[in-house]
């Protein structure tokens, strides 16, 4: 048996290759849309990929099962459970098979047994892995978005992203019963989850890539409640608002996304700064400057949005970019390929052009904003009549905040600044200063005088300045 782990750090997404060394067959569990890594490993290791297995209809990346099927004639295996979620409707010309609880997919002498584990979604299935050439019992289970290291899949995405009313509590109760089934596994059983730390599919995913059933039973907080209502309360409390692109993923993954061969790659464009700024001011365009927030704050093109690459790029493109606009990216030429791959992985395919950062130097029509410490802000608050804006999430605001500050989470900022006055400077903060830098670029585009509070609320507290508590 052969087992290979693949991980997309930008989307915190894990996928797996399972192969039979005797027959040379291989299957991919939860493949991403960018399938080149799978094809490369299969070629190097001498495998033919002929199966692609889905654990569920994904919300946080574009599934690659249809891409594999189109390019390699791979058969798609997907859940036929949870019909209330609509199920899959792949093109009938693609080789495919629905799976029910207990069905077995053979990869040579390796067996993958489908186990219905609803909760994160109604159709969710996990796959028990058995090396049947050498053992009669499974070695582990691919848990998808059912059980993570240190967490479990959130059940509220269908309600928050797809608008299915009352599905969050129903999913939480399904998940409670699925976990009771999970706890019956022997402690030695390995678990291979679909996501790692940083994914929005759970509250507190661990950074360790794999675990065991025994370890999770001892230390996973979501596996501790013994009563159903206690579990439901625990699981639904504190779930953040999912990224906007999750709704699009729920729309495209049941049917399959456009083949990558038909997607325009986006080209390097030879324009000056004035022309790029003009592009940025058109309604159906978004021009993203991926430089550091420090560089952007000193000098930037009007109309551009600052989403630094790589650390914040995937998350905030997913929260702020629209599928209805053309994308233009200011970035270093050597990063173009990685950025294109990330955007395609989220289905953001309307990539029209790339520009080098040197384009900023081709015009004098630039703008800037100040970065100031919390103490500097408090000293200027009365003399300059500052308005303080907190762009953290709702739960962070409710936990503690700056007195008299206004609150507007970053993902709602582009369309929600009516509570701010353009007659007063806006001092904006988040927890550490990263999200507020993105917010500063958006506020600049809307005509505000902006100050970014360096170090954010964390520094505000460390300097012992007054908070709401």
Image (tube, helix red, strand yellow):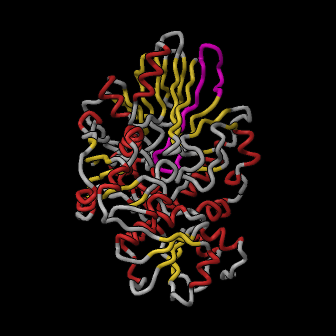
Residue situated furthest right in the rendering: 218
Q: In this view, does 376 lie to the left or right of 28?
A: right
Residue 291 percent across, percent down from the top left: 44, 53
Q: Is residue 389 left or right of residue 206?
A: left
- Count of numbered labels shown in the rendering: 0
Compare residues 160 and 172 and report the one nearer the observer. Answer: 160
Residue 460 percent across, percent down from the top left: 65, 73
Residue situated furthest top in the rendering: 22
* Residue appearing at x 58%, y 44% in the figure: 196
Does residue 394 appear in the picture of this structure?
A: no
**Residue 282: quadrant of the picture:** bottom left
* Residue appearing at x 38%, y 50% in the figure: 357
Residue 195 percent across, percent down from the top left: 55, 43
Q: Is residue 195 left or right of residue 246?
A: right
Magenta region's main secondary structure? loop
Q: In this view, does 333 lie above or below 302?
A: above
Task: Please say whether residue 177 is one of the residues in the magenta stretch.
Answer: no
Q: In this view, does 404 lie above or below 456?
A: below
Does residue 226 appear in the picture of this structure?
A: yes
Compare residues 178 and 445 and report the one nearer the observer. Answer: 445
Q: What stretch is highlighted in magenta?
A: 118-139
Looking at the figure, which quarter contains the C terminus?
Answer: bottom right
Residue 41 percent across, percent down from the top left: 47, 21
Compare residues 372 and 187 and report the one nearer the observer. Answer: 372
Task: Please say whether residue 132 is one of the residues in the magenta stretch.
Answer: yes
* Residue appearing at x 53%, y 36% in the figure: 7
Q: Is residue 193 left or right of residue 346?
A: right
Compare residues 41 and 214 and report the one nearer the observer. Answer: 41
């Amino acid at each position: 048996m052969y087992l290979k782990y693949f991980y997309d750090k930008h989307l915190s997404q894990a996928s797996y290759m399972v192969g039979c060394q005797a027959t040379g067959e291989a299957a991919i569990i939860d493949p991403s849309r960018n399938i080149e890594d799978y094809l490369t490993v299969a070629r190097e290791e001498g495998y033919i990929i002929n199966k692609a297995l889905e654990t569920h209809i994904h919300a946080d990346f574009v599934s690659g099962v249809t891409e594999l099927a189109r390019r390699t004639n791979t058969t798609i295996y997907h859940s036929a459970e949870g019909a209330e979620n609509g199920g899959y409707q792949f093109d009938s010309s693609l080789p495919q098979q629905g799976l029910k609880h207990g069905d077995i997919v053979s990869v040579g002498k390796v067996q993958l047994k489908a186990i219905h584990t609803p909760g994160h979604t109604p159709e969710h299935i996990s796959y028990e892995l058995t090396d049947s050439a050498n053992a009669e019992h499974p070695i582990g289970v691919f848990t998808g978005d059912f059980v993570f290291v240190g967490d479990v899949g959130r059940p509220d995405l269908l309600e928050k992203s797809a608008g299915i009313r009352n599905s969050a509590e129903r999913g939480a109760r399904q998940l409670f019963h699925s976990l009771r089934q999970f706890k019956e596994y022997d402690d030695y059983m390995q678990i291979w989850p679909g996501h790692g730390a940083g994914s929005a599919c759970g509250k507190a995913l661990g950074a360790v890539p794999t675990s065991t059933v025994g370890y999770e039973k001892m230390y996973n907080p979501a596996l501790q409640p013994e009563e159903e209502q206690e579990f439901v309360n625990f699981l639904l409390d504190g779930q953040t608002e999912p990224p906007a692109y999750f709704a699009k993923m729920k729309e495209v993954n049941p049917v399959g996304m456009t083949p990558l061969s038909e997607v325009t790659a986006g080209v390097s464009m030879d324009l000056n700064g004035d022309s790029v700024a003009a592009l940025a001011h058109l309604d159906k365009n978004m021009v993203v400057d991926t430089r550091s927030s420090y560089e952007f704050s000193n000098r930037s093109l009007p109309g551009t949005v600052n989403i630094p690459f790589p650390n914040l790029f995937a998350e905030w493109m997913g929260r702020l970019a629209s599928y209805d606009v053309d994308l233009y990216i200011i970035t270093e030429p050597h990063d173009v390929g990685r950025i294109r791959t990330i955007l395609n992985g989220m289905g953001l395919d309307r990539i029209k052009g790339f520009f080098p950062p040197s384009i900023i130097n081709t015009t004098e029509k630039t703008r800037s904003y100040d970065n100031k410490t919390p103490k500097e802000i408090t000293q200027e608050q009365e003399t300059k009549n500052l308005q303080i804006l907190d762009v953290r999430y709702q739960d962070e605001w409710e936990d503690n905040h700056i007195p008299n500050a206004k609150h507007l989470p970053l993902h709602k900022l582009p369309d929600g600044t009516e509570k701010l006055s353009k007659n007063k400077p806006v001092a904006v903060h988040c927890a550490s200063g990263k999200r507020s830098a993105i917010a500063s670029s958006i506020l600049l585009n809307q005509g505000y005088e902006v100050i970014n509070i360096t170090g954010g609320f964390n520094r505000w507290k460390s300097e012992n300045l007054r908070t709401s508590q």
